Amino acid sequence: MTFEGRLDYESFRLSKSDPSVLAAAAAIEAEGKTPDFAIANGGLDANWLSARGLPTVSLGCGQNNIHTIDEWQDLTEFHRARRIALRLATEQ
């Protein structure tokens, strides 16, 4: 048996002092939540953007059991994520 590999996504790690992290943390806190500075294991748009010089924070949106037959969406968290994204897009 032969295995072949390829790199689909560049890994990255942003500093907690990166402006994109600070902005995301402020938007999350404005919604009454505490940011969780975690490492995501997967391929995200943030990987592609960060690899090309645009530091990008990835935000959760209430997904559970992702990519399984038991996947479900927490709508309360989804709407909170929507409000956080709107803050990031419209506040200075």
Image: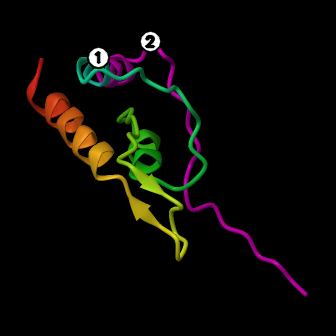
Contact flag, marks 2 and 1 (Cβ < 8 Å): no
Comparing marks 2 and 1, which lies closer to the viewer? 1
Residue extending furthest toward the right: 1
| Residue 48: numbered disc | none
In magenta segment, residue 5 = yes
Residue name at image x 53 percent, y 77 percent: 69
Point out the image quarter for the C terminus: top left
* Mark 1: secondary structure: helix
Residue 83 rendering spot, x and y as whole percentages: 18, 36
Q: Residue 4 occupies which quadrant of the picture?
A: bottom right
Going by the numbered disc 1, the residue's amino acid type is Ala
Residue 82 rendering spot, x and y as whole percentages: 21, 43
Which one is in front, 19 or 73?
Answer: 73
Q: Decide whether the magenta segment is chiefly helix, strand or loop.
A: loop
Number of other residues with Cα within 10 Å of mark 2, as a class: few under 14, some 14 to 19, many 20 or more: few
Residue at image mark 2: 17
In this picture, is 63 found above or below 23? below
Which one is in front, 87 or 20?
Answer: 87
Residue name at image x 25 percent, y 38 percent: 80
Residue at image mark 1: 26
Give the side of residue 32 with respect to residue 47, left or right.
Answer: left
Residue 3 rendering spot, x and y as whole percentages: 82, 78
Colour scheme of the rendered structure? rainbow
Magenta-highlighted residues: 1-25
Going by the numbered disc 2, the residue's amino acid type is Ser
Q: CA distance from mark 2 to mark 1?
A: 12 Å
Residue name at image x 37 percent, y 36 percent: 56
Which one is in front, 83 or 5?
Answer: 83
Residue 20 rendering spot, x and y as whole percentages: 34, 24
Q: Residue 76 occupies which quadrant of the picture?
A: top left
In this picture, is 67 found above or below 55? below
